[in-house]
Structure formats: C-alpha cells, structure tokens
Image (spheres, rainbow, N blue to C red):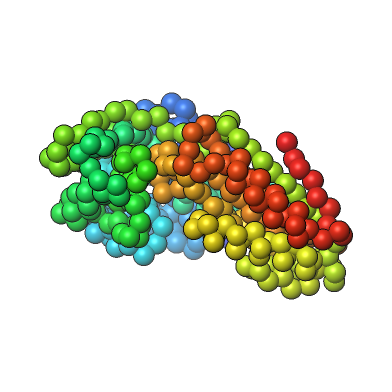
Amino acid sequence: MEGAMSKDRKIHILLSPWFLISLFILLLNDYVLKAGFPSWITGKLSDFSGIFVLILFLVGTTSVSPKLIGWITAIGFTLWKSSYSSPVIDLWNTYFPNISRVVDYTDLLALSVIPMAISYAKSSTPVSIKKILLLPVILVSAFAIMGTSRAMYNTPIEVIKPAIEIKQNDISLLKKLDDFAEEKGWQNKHDPSKTSRRYVTKSASVSVYANYDNDTQKLYLRVSGLQEETDVINKIRGEVLSQLESEGNIEIMEAPVIDTWTEDPYFKWHVRMHGYSAGGPVTKLSDFVMETGENVALNNLYQVIATSLEDRGYNYRVCRSGVDQYTCREYLIGSVLGPYEYSKSTRVLLSLSGRWLKSTLNLSVVQYVQEDSIPAEKLAAELNQELMDILPEEIEFETLD
C-alpha cells in the first residue's frame, strides 16, 4: 500500500537504477545533446525524463503520496506548457532572473510517463548503496530539475545608416527601436541613457540586443532565443527590420560578431606584481579596502591605475569573481564589435587578489582589431610608465607573454 512505504525506502528510491538512469539522460540531453543536436527528439526527451525524475524525487524527499504527486505534476505541467502561465512568467521575470518555456501542446505527451513513474515508486525495493551518496544525488537532481540548458538560436545582423545621411552621435535608429519596443510591450533591461539595449519580448526566452557605435555610426542588432522558437525569432527579426527601414534608406548586412573571449587578439600586454602580505590571509576585500593580509603598496597601485583609467573616461564593470578575497575591474572600451553592451574592441583588466602571505596585482590590455579609436599599444605604454614611476622596490614585477 502507498501509506506503507517506509521513510527509508522512500528516500532510497533516489539511488534506484531507473531514477539514476533517467537523471543521467536528463543531464546528458540538456547539457550536451540539445546544444549539439537540437531537434524535436531532444526537446521531448527532456520532458519525458524530467517528469520521471521529478516524480521520483518528490516521492523520495516528501511525505506526499505518489498518486497525489502524479496528479499535481500533471496539472502543473499542463498549466506550465499553456499560455495561462504567461502572466506569472512575466511577473517573475520583472523581479527575478528570467525563466521561459515554449507553448507546445505536443509536450503534453510526456504526461504518459506519470503512471510508469508512480508504479515504479510503489514497486521499487531499497538498494544496498551507502547513504553517503544520497546528498550528492539530491543536489544533482535539484540542479537538473531547476536548471536545464537549452541551445540558443541567433540571427546576427548589422544595420548601417549611410554616413552622408546622419550626423555624429545620431542615434535615431536606437530611438526608433525604443519606440517600437514600448509599443510591443517589451522590457528594456538596460539604462536608456546608454547606447546599448536588451529588450525582453513577450516570449520571455527571446531577447533583442542592440548596440550603437557613435564612431562608426553602426547599429548592431541580434535576436536570440531558444532553438525551438526559431519561427518567433524570425518573425520578431522581420518586424524590427521593417521598423528600422521606415526610418530611411539603410543598408542591412550579416555581421560576424567577434567573441572577445575566444578570438586571438591583435595586441596583448600583461603585467603582474607580487607583494608579501601582513597578518595572514585576506578576510575581506572590496574596492580599495583589504582587511588583514593587506599589502599596502599593491593596494595603492590598484587605486592609482583605477583612477588613471577612470580619468580617461573609461567606465568599468565589476568582474564576476564571487570571491571575497578578490577584487576586479573590467574596462571594455573602443569600437563596438557586436550587439551586446560589452562587445568592445579593447579590454583592460585590473585585478587584485590576496592569499596567504602574498597578494597579487594583475593588469592587462587586450585589443582584438588592428585599427581602433583607442590605440592599445600607446595605452599600455602609458600605464607601464605610470607603474614604473611609482613602483616600490619591495614589489616583484613581471611582464607575461
């Protein structure tokens, strides 16, 4: 009987063969197969394996009966895959990281796996595996259920207004996009005072990215979304282009976007400085402040270089390190290379880290195009001279390849 399932037996279902096989299929499909072989089959495979894993996971970790879990899953999945969930998704995406789903009623075929999952939950027997494995399985299962990965579909285009027809700093195309996005009810996730945009459309998985370059007078545009929403993406792309073309005579070209994380740079300069820390490891590190383990000389160098870059008018973003013992600023400057806010031709990285007995300051200048509004070699030489003028004798200095 359902009520007779012991707590030990319920939790051990997470170590049963078919649960682990389904979990493996779900992870393999979401993080490998969908990206490499996007198709109708990989889309449905996630639904079937995901529902099977979800039901057994809830059976193993809650006191709810398998039959009730099956009914809740069926109702919840049906609502999730329907248009009725759109208002909830829109509200969530307004305040939290975006979630999305594709309204495809053929996905409801996956509900046929529910009776099999319930039957397996009732009939499975405990396996003789050490309980120490339960925690990692629970964590991996939760990750697989909540954070599936889907292949993205991109349509990069470059929209150019002839230089003879526009003035310097003319961003009428960007204004046209703003008006169109407002009319369509899209959310702009970027500061309107900037020349970059990210609009989240009504289909939450589809976003429109735009980035205007004042120097070259080009607007880079990209529509991105899930592979299975190709038709929606192409429709939005067509609507956006129609709006832009109504602004006047423009030229539209496919634009290869340079990936500044994988492309071989045209120019690279990297220096590293080391200094011994006092008082053990760093316990807290934020902008210009290190508590214990602090090397005052390196801290001062960090401030000098940061101030020098900002005096040049360069804006920065904080690197996503997520570690208290590390502070990092990334200055993305120069010409626009693509549709994203930080698709820039030159990258200056300034980082300061503190460890046991030693702190390290890194400074690098990397440029990805030969001709640019910012001469990277000159910038590197100036920064190098500024360092040499104030570098204390106790600081170790090295230039890296």
Q: For this rendering, which residue is in front, 369 or 158?
A: 369
User: x%, y% of residue 392?
Assistant: 82, 61
Residue 19's quadrant in the figure?
top right
Q: Residue at image x 49%, y 58%?
A: 313
Q: Residue at image x 43%, y 38%?
A: 337
Q: Is residue 209 visible?
A: no
Q: Would you say 81 lies left or right of 372 here?
A: left
Q: Would you say 400 lies left or right of 372 here?
A: right
User: x%, y% of residue 47?
Assistant: 38, 40
Residue 183's quadrant in the figure?
bottom left
Q: Residue at image x 72%, y 55%?
A: 387
Q: Residue at image x 20%, y 39%?
A: 165
User: x%, y% of residue 326?
Assistant: 68, 60
Residue 266's quadrant in the figure?
top right
Residue placed farthest to the bottom in the image?
291
User: x%, y% of residue 294?
Assistant: 78, 68
Q: Is residue 342 visible?
A: yes
For the C terminus, the quadrant is: top right
Q: Would you say 14 lies left or right of 219 here?
A: right
Q: For this rendering, which residue is in front, 34 or 329?
A: 329
Residue placed farthest to the left in the image?
246
Q: Is residue 185 above or below residue 37?
A: below
Looking at the rendered structure, the number of numbered marks drawn on it comes to 0
